[in-house]
Amino acid sequence: MRWRLALGTIRAHRASCLASAAVMAAGTALLAAFASLLETGLATGRDSGFLIMLPAILGGWTVAIVAFGVVSTVSLTIEHREQELALLRSIAATPRQIRQSVVLETIVVAVPAIAAGLLPGVGLGSVVLGRLVDGGLVGAGTVLQAGRLCVAIGAGTSLCAAVAAALISSRRAASIPPVRALTAAPPARALTRGRVAGAGLLVIGLSLSATTLFMDDGPLLSSTAGPAGVAVAVGLALLSPAAVLPVGWLSNARFGAVGRLAARNVHARPRHTGGVASPLILLVGIAGGTLYMQSTEDSVSQGTTGVSAQLAPVNYLVVAMIITFTAIVVVNTLIAATRRRRREFGLLRLSAATRGQVLGMVAAEGVVTAVLAVVLGTVAAAATTVPYSLVKTGSPLASGPIWMYGAIAGGALLLVMAASLPTAAGALRTRPVDALSAP
């Protein structure tokens, strides 16, 4: 019975489950790539310093990035089903049964997705190893090893993150009393817990950033500078609902009816807006921090043929892999969040709003979300670049072209618009009356 319910639920929410599966597969591939390099270094023994150092430094905070991406995606998927889960509570399902059902559904989706991500991950690891060999940093005869360690790190981390997200998110719907089940009202303490966790990560990130200032200039400098930016980005992402609240003053500004409606939507739903902005904050913070950290390193080692110059192409490849994964999380989050608003769009249409006005509202909300993410993401990037640049060059300003920052900010806005507007346009094709009965 439990298995039939799980499979039926997955079929009914096929699009959301596929989005979660895509993130888990991409995250597993990224982790498996680093794990295969680490396993190769451990198996090779001598002359394997870079094969151990690279995944140890970059792979460590990549685990945090993947875990956050998987948790946020799975949590959002379950959150969108709260009314459905609350209905089960109203027909005598116990909280334990709700939690077990959600965890089982998550595992059914996660296992094939994680398995599908392992082989591409080994391929990515082979590409990175090839770059290391081409740069003369690893012996030409080195063969990639992908065994138990690769599977344990790649598959284990993604599965644990998915199950943890299912357990945490299912507690909210499972705790709703049956008499209030159909309202599915969010508990007031949810935002407080996020603030506490966000503040804690912010302190950890700033501590790592300060530690970087007292480290020697060398290959281990990024071992604290990189994680500092990631911790600050995740902390700010958890605190982002509070950052949305000042947007309320825009609801009275002279931006037209569409602009005022968008501002009121953003202000009235800080938890929703913060959840949508979270992966985008992480994307901007990681992209800005890692790219400018590497460009600063390039400016210092320019004209030399040392290890730093040989390692630069590998670092850029790894950064591109991490940014690609984060972009996948961003797109999936935006599409899922926009699809959930079909009933809201239908109600607006029945209230005499035109399709153009609804799309304009979605675009205005997207601009606010992108601006919020760029501002907070820039703060996170600074936690990486400022101490790193001070140690490397003596200046708090990172070396690198200004157009790179413009590309990051513009790319964030483009991702928001490319994911939300077509999804909203597709939702508006449904008749307004039919949209009101949409799940």
Image (cartoon, rainbow, N blue to C red):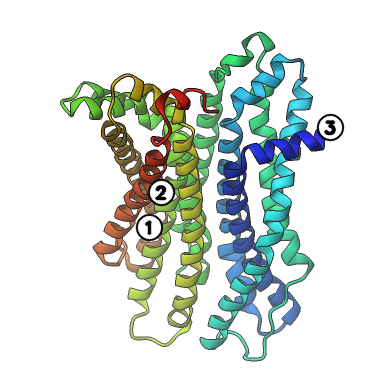
Which residue position is annotated with label 3?
A: 1
Question: How many residues crowd mark 3 within 10 Å: few (<14), some (14–19), many (20+)?
Answer: few
Residue at 62 percent of width and 77 percent of height: 126
Q: Give the position of the C terminus as an image quadrant.
A: top right
Which residue position is annotated with label 2?
A: 380
Above or below for 210 versus 264: below
Above or below for 213 versus 438: below
Above or below for 155 versus 50: above
Left or right position of 85 against 382: right
Residue at 45 percent of width and 52 percent of height: 229
| Mark 2 or mark 1: whose residue is earlier in sequence | 1
Q: Position of residue 379 (x, y in %)?
A: 36, 47
Q: Which mark is residue 288?
A: 1
From the viewer's perspective, is the residue at label 3 or at label 2 nearer?
Answer: 3
Provide the secondary structure element on which disc 2 rests.
helix
Q: Give the position of the N terminus as an image quadrant.
A: top right
